Image (tube, helix red, strand yellow):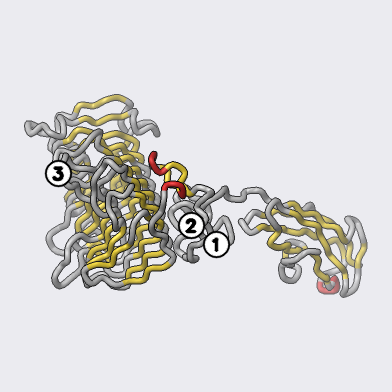
Amino acid sequence: MLAPGTYQLTNTLYINGTYTNVAIRGGTNNRDDVVLSGPGMTNAAYGNVPYGIWTGGNVQGITIANLTIRDLFYHPIIFNAGTQSPRVYNVHLIDAGEQFIKSNPNGAGGGVDNGIVEYSVIEYTTTAKSGYTNGVDVHTGANWIIRHNLFRNIVGPPTQLAGPAVLIWTGSSNTLTEGNTFLNCARAIAYGLVDVAGGFDHSGGTIRNNFVHRSSTQPGDVAIGVADSPNTQVLNNTVYLSGTYSTPIEYRFTGTTGAALKNNLLDGFIWARDGATGTEQNNLTGATPDMLVNAAAGDLHLAASAASAIDHGVALTNVTNDWDGQTRPIGPAQDIGADEFGTADTTPPTVSLTAPASGATVSGTGVMVSANASDNVGVAGVQFKVDGGNLRSEDVSSPYSRVWNSTTVSNGSHTLTAIARDAAGNTTTSAAVTVTVN
């Protein structure tokens, strides 16, 4: 645990050996309170500080959280073979000489698995020192999750194309990249990069609910690329490159089979190239700035004028919320892109029992139990209960009532309630009514 302050590193922090559940974290939840500073990303005389944090050997579970690491000649964070289940949380990485987070293979077909990078900011203050850079670079890693991060200015100097901000390749698999924002990056996400003979550069995995924006003055390449990666899904992403690249989403090479590209919103076209095959469904190409709240500033939420995107997506069982975490759909169908337009309904319905009256004595097989229910959007159904158990099935249309066969319970006091729900899943339970069965 590190106390707030700026620490000028005189040595790389090495964790090399057999360790379980190690943590390096700042002492507060503000990642800018603790700063680990290196000698500079262009300073070749880095001495004992080529990296910020280095792990290897047999490190089973490491968390790096709540701090800033900046100005390293190579990598602020490097996970070497033998490390497993690393987690990078609420970290700010600034100005790396090469890859910001590097995960290396073991040379025998394996690597670092089950990594998580989340709620972090990874950026250059201007540009990288060369095109040889990435935000997260994973070799031969399985089951990585990259979510809810901001990648900014992952670009090379003039005339040099930087690598993808998120690059998962060389035999990696089952990566999930979701809910991230990429601002002015030369390339955003790549699952696979090259056409591997006798294998795959990546396989499986999902890319969903990401915002990608590049200004008209920032040159670059493809935003989301799937290369030699079978059975990869690209779902509900919003990509606006300001006309800097005509095919913002591409899938390529004959090894890419079974790809699914659905509900993506982009200001260009999707390109299946070099023999790739897959299914494209309900994508909206040729997006214009008026469809977005503030495209020039990188705010890619849908505007009310985006009628061709709102409620025009296909239902996807593995896309249940949006970039903001709002439940999908808000309207009658899912929206296209990473944002679900509108505000989620959080107002619960109201409900009250109208019959029988509290304190009434009832008997027989035909006791009518009824309720009034209302909602700001609409009541989806009312479930009546006797002593906490369901009274027949839910009534999904007004007037809300069910016939109760009171002979199925013992004589004496019993409690009736009604639960109303709306389409957003909000529920309300009525005040209880107590009756006597005789």
Please tell me how many numbered marks the rendered image carries.
3
Camera-nearest residue between 291 and 224 = 291
How many neighbours does mark 2 have within 10 angstroms: few (below 14), some (14-19), or many (20 or more)? many
x, y (%) of residue 45? 7, 31
Disc 1 element: loop
- Asked if the residue under mark 3 is in contact with the one under mark 2, i.e. CB atoms within 8 Å, the reply is no
* Residue at 70 percent of width and 57 percent of height: 378
The quarter holding residue 44 reads top left
Of the residues under marks 1 and 2, which one precedes in the sequence? Answer: 2
x, y (%) of residue 292? 45, 47
Of badges 1 and 3, nearer the viewer stands 3
Disc 2/disc 3 C-alpha distance (Å): 36 Å
Quadrant housing the C terminus: bottom right
x, y (%) of residue 225? 27, 59
Residue 151 showing in the rendered view? no
Disc 1/disc 2 C-alpha distance (Å): 10 Å
Q: Is residue 117 above or below residue 388?
A: above
Question: Label for residue 333?
Answer: 1
Disc 1/disc 3 C-alpha distance (Å): 44 Å
Residue 408 showing in the rendered view? yes
* Residue at 14 percent of width and 42 percent of height: 130
Q: Is residue 101 above or below residue 352?
A: above
Of the residues under marks 2 and 3, which one precedes in the sequence? Answer: 3
355 left or right, relative to 430: right
The quarter holding residue 383 reads bottom right
Residue bearing the label numbered 3:
159
- Which three-letter amino acid code belongs to the residue tagged 2? Ala
* Residue at 76 percent of width and 63 percent of height: 384
* Residue at 34 percent of width and 36 percent of height: 66
Residue bearing the label numbered 2:
309
- Which three-letter amino acid code belongs to the residue tagged 1? Ala
208 left or right, relative to 309: left
